[in-house]
Image (cartoon, rainbow, N blue to C red):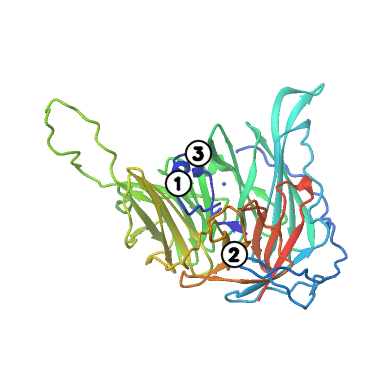
Amino acid sequence: MASMFANVRGLGRYAALMALTALAMEGCVTGTATYSPSAGPAKTTSMSALPTIAPDDTVSDPGQATPTGAPADLSNIPPAPVGAWKSIRWVQVPGTFVGAPPSPGPGSSASAGSQTFGIYGWSRGFVGFSAQMWLSTSSGMWDGGPTVATISTIHSEDGVHWHDGTVLQHPMLNDNLEVTGVFEGPSRLLAVGISGACGTGWVEALWTSADGISWQKVDTKKAFGNATIENVSGGSSGFVATDAAGRAVWTSRDGQSWRSVNLAASAFAGARIDGGTASSGGYVLAGSTVPVGPVSCSPALADPSARPTPPPPMRSPAVWWSADGANWTKAQLPDATPAYSVAMQVCRANVQTLVAFESYGSDGNFGSALWTSNDGRTWKSPGWPPGLDPTQFLTDGRHGIVLSVVHPADGSSNSEGMSISTVTDDGSMAVMAQQGNRPPYVTNGDSVGKWAIGPTGILWADGDQWSSNPQLWIGLPS
């Protein structure tokens, strides 16, 4: 599953806005060195014998699963039903689903930074990544040699039976790398690795794959030059990348060859681009615009010699659509709120639905707005269920879900479970019923673990590192 965005803008101006906004969207999901994977034979990880699992009894209340009498046979997982899902049945998968943790790169022996892992779904299965940094050492001390990220990959057709895949390596200048999103384009997947330091972040590496097993590195120097890429996303029409300044955009059909978008075109007058995505209808960008031309700063002053600093121009949220990535049209957002600070994102919720999200701030007032579209050209403000507070949008390109921690009516930080809603084709949401042995996806009132959506349903894994032997649950939809 791709999280909705793979970007790092939240570390800068996004942080101030999002911290004060009731809605926070995670991920909805970011080198030029020589690619030298060490690929061994695919090996099935622990889950060779899968028994029939009987669900545990659970308490029936909002956001929690309810018991069901029928056992689940995990030896043969059927494809999830086509169309809107109305309920899911949770089953814990026995054993652990990951292979060996990342091993040191050539000439490296000391680990640096934390180990990361993530799982993602696509139309033909699921993929997983675990990254670990390694230092070049002599006599137990860093010898000034290169830092190398080793990324182990796994893959599964059904989310239950997993196999080891390609091992990737990438030289680093700092001590962290995490694969934060996988997007499915017209013919292949694009995996996005982000890095960061000192409160900033950037897209460090990209890889493509036609089968989710073998991965090929993207020459980002050739694709983007010296630009700092901050946002990468994609869908059935292709992929989109935007830079940290909001002044450059690239599109791609295959994730390997990229072409720049002409932001000097009249459709982009006064524009700053925050992100983009692609769907069956073409490419969509999201950002904001400022008035172009003379601006009146203030009324007459009592002291004509005073020279006050004019306020910054008000920015208006905006989206643009293109069928081919070359010719762009600015779309209208109904009831858009101009503000001094505007941050925008756009993502796919499912095959039919796009979601554009605005977080804004002016004169100490902060807020958010949301629009949906079925084609990227015509947008509307959807009617959300009362009290819904989405904290995470997740999708595999065909089904989208919204995760929301359910809190008691007294407003305390305690949790009554997790509400899982599907995003319908008209942009509305429908809460799914949950049955079976639900996973412990809420701790101390916060959502935890890793989520993925794929061809057989919804996956949830506990833990944040492969070395902790994360446990896996699968939600079988109906």
Total label count? Answer: 3
- Of marks 2 and 1, which one's residue comes earlier in the chain? 1
Label 1: how many residues lie within 10 Å, few (<14), some (14-19) or many (20+)?
Answer: some
Q: Is residue 91 above or below residue 100?
A: below
User: Going 51% across and 47% down the picture, which residue do you hit?
Assistant: 231
Look at label 3 and name its amino acid.
Answer: Thr
Q: Residue extending furthest front?
A: 410
Label 2 close to label 1 by CB (< 8 Å): no
Q: Is residue 317 left or right of residue 23?
A: left
Look at label 2 and name its amino acid.
Answer: Ser
Nearer the observer, 344 or 319:
344
Circle 3 — which element? loop
Q: Is residue 366 above or below residue 144?
A: below
The residue that disc 1 covers is 20
Nearer the observer, 113 or 439:
439
Q: Can the viewer see residue 187 in this picture? A: yes
Residue 344: horizontal and vertical position, in percent?
Answer: 42, 51
User: Going 67% across and 54% down the picture, which residue do you hit?
Assistant: 450
Quadrant for residue 306, please give it: top left
Q: Can the viewer see residue 325 in this picture? A: no
User: Going 40% across and 60% down the picture, which residue do you hit?
Assistant: 321
Q: Mark on residue 228? A: 3
Nearer the observer, 384 or 294:
384
Q: Is residue 10 above or below residue 175?
A: below
The residue that disc 2 covers is 419
Circle 1 — which element? loop
Circle 2 — which element? strand
Q: Is residue 435 left or right of residue 202?
A: right
User: Going 61% across and 55% down the picture, which residue do you hit?
Assistant: 414
